[in-house]
Structure formats: structure tokens, C-alpha cells
Amino acid sequence: MNYNNLLVETTDGITTLTVNRPQVLNALNGDVVRELECALYELDLDVTVKAVVLTGAGDKAFVAGADIKEMSEISSFDALSFARRGQSLMKLINKMGKPVIAAVNGYALGGGLELALACDFIYASEKAKFGFPEVGLGVIPGFGGTQNLARLIGPNKANELVFSGRIISASKALSWGIVNEVFQADELLPKALETAREIASKGSLGVASAKDAIVNGMNMSKEDGFRYEAALFGVLFATGDQREGMGAFLEKRAAQFKGN
Ligand code: DAK
């Protein structure tokens, strides 16, 4: 499928998905949200794709939030539809059976930070900046940002960031646990792709089940989470990937996973 606001490039099972509106710092309008949802659905269904790296075009922004111009003019029913689409996009990233890595190359503000937080983890360039400016616009984060951030870094730091609307640096985001690692700007994408390739070399059913266990286990009691993990563990013993992975170890050779 062709997209007006996205670049989709797949090499060796790794897709780089780029939000491509650099003239407005990749702000999310209704079309971008719709296209992201379609693209991620397609990538989830494509068995040849093992991992996705999500980034922004240009050297200034990952995504500088929802498109304020479009948002300022919409009706309440359009806002409702925008909210539903945005929330369904964030949930889709969680439900996908493959990892999505956010490579934050500049501003990740408002809905842009929410998009990054919905991904499985975040790598950042040293030029990246993070924040929730929503309270300065008279609203609050509405694509799951308050929930995901507070679960990730705890309520106290989340409160400071959301209540103040302050923009923080990549190094602060690293020390707060929002991002996993910070790289020089020209190293960011290569490092994200390197990690994606490392993940892609593993059994894709195992990776999908691990994501399922972590994403869904976070919303369960520890007891239920343990039970869920055990069920997923058991199911993997019905797969060719489990036989191949353990067989390859015993035969002292590299595993050739087929995702079956
Ligand atoms: N929307 C639209 N245009 C934007 C934009 C945005 N979010 N951010 C930047 N731009 C545009 C600028 O207007 C400018 O366009 P021109 O003037 O050249 O036509 C161009 O991008 C370059 O930006 P600047 O000239 O401002 O660049 P600077 O380097 O000076 O400043 C900045 C960079 C990132 C600090 C600044 O652009 C800025 O403050 N941008 C706005 C950040 C922001 O407040 N983002 C929105 C957060 S609110 C919802 C759920 C979620 C949301 C909404 C609804 N529902 C549940 C319904 C999400 C809300 C948000 O994301």
C-alpha cells in the first residue's frame, strides 16, 4: 500500500517506518494516525517482517505531538473519532506479535511521546527531547500517556513531567528510565536496526510470546501473570522453533528458526 505521510522500507525482515511530515515536525494529524494504523496492521500480518523500527523524518523531530492546527479546528465528534483512532493505534502496537522499537531522533512531545511510550522500548539520539506540553494547551495527554509513563517511571516523576509541561533532554530521559539508551545522532538508526536484527535472529514465536507475557502480565496480578507465562511457555513446546532451538544447541550449530 502507498502512504502519503509515511515511508516504509523493509530490508532482511526489518521494517523502518518513518513518519514523514518534516515541515511540521512530523505532527500527527488524522491522516497520519490512520496511515500508521494501516501500516502496522499490514506489518503485523506480514510473516516476513520480524521487527519494526519507528522514527521521524528529518533531524529535528520524532513527532512533535498532535497537529495543533488541525486539532484547534475540529468538532467534538471529530475529536472523539481522533481519540478512538489514536487509542486503537497505541493498543495495536501492544498487540502486535513483533517488537516495535522507537528511534527518537528529536522532539517527542505530547502524542509523539505517547507514540514512543506505546512502543516496546525507546532508543534516543543525544538531540532528542521529551515532554508533555498538553497542560499548556488546556488539556491532558489522551493517547495513554499518563498511564504508560506512570507505569514506566512511577507516579512521582510522571507527575513532575506532566504537571509542568517541561521538556527534558535525552540524558535526563535516560536517567529517569524513559529511554533504554542514548546514541550520537548518526548512530541512532544503525543501533536500532542492529538490535532489531539481533531480535529477528531469534525464534519469532518465542519473541511474540515474550512480548505477550510482558505486555499482558503488566495488567495482571503477579499470580495471574505467572500462570499466563506458564501457559505461553507450555504452548511453545508444540512448535518447530522450540525443537529447532534446543536441537541446534545440542548439535552445537546455529538455529534456523522458521516461525512455526
Ligand atoms: N502541530 C502542528 N504544527 C507543528 C507542531 C504541532 N504539534 N509542532 C511544530 N509545528 C510546526 C510549526 O508550526 C512550524 O510550522 P511553520 O510555522 O514553519 O509553518 C514548524 O512545525 C516548525 O516548528 P517551529 O518553527 O515551532 O520549530 P522550533 O524549533 O522553533 O520549535 C518546538 C520546536 C517543538 C518546540 C515547537 O514547534 C513546539 O512547541 N511545537 C508544539 C509542541 C506541542 O505542543 N505539541 C502538541 C502537544 S499536544 C487526543 C489525544 C492526544 C492528543 C490530542 C488529542 N485525543 C484523545 C483527542 C495529543 C496532544 C498533543 O500532542
Image (cartoon, rainbow, N blue to C red):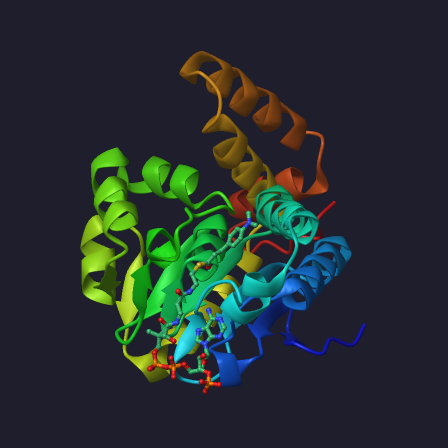
Split into quadrants, the picture shows ligand 1 in the one at bottom left
Tell me which residue sits at (34%, 67%) in the image: 124
Could you say where residue 162 lies in the image, as x and y percent from the top left? 30, 47
Could you say where residue 103 lies in the image, as x and y percent from the top left? 43, 67
Front position in the image: 144 or 39: 144
Q: Quadrant of residue 5?
A: bottom right
Q: Quadrant of the C terminus?
A: top right
Tell me which residue sits at (18%, 54%) in the image: 175
Q: Residue furthest right?
A: 1
Could you say where residue 28 lies in the image, as x and y percent from the top left? 56, 66
Front position in the image: 259 or 223: 223
Above or below: residue 178 compared with residue 60: above
Could you say where residue 155 lies in the image, as x and y percent from the top left? 26, 35
Q: Quadrant of the N terminus?
A: bottom right
Q: Is residue 44 left or right of residue 86?
A: right
Above or below: residue 2 compared with residue 251: below
Front position in the image: 59 or 71: 71
Q: Is residue 97 visible?
A: no
Tell me which residue sits at (64%, 56%) in the image: 256
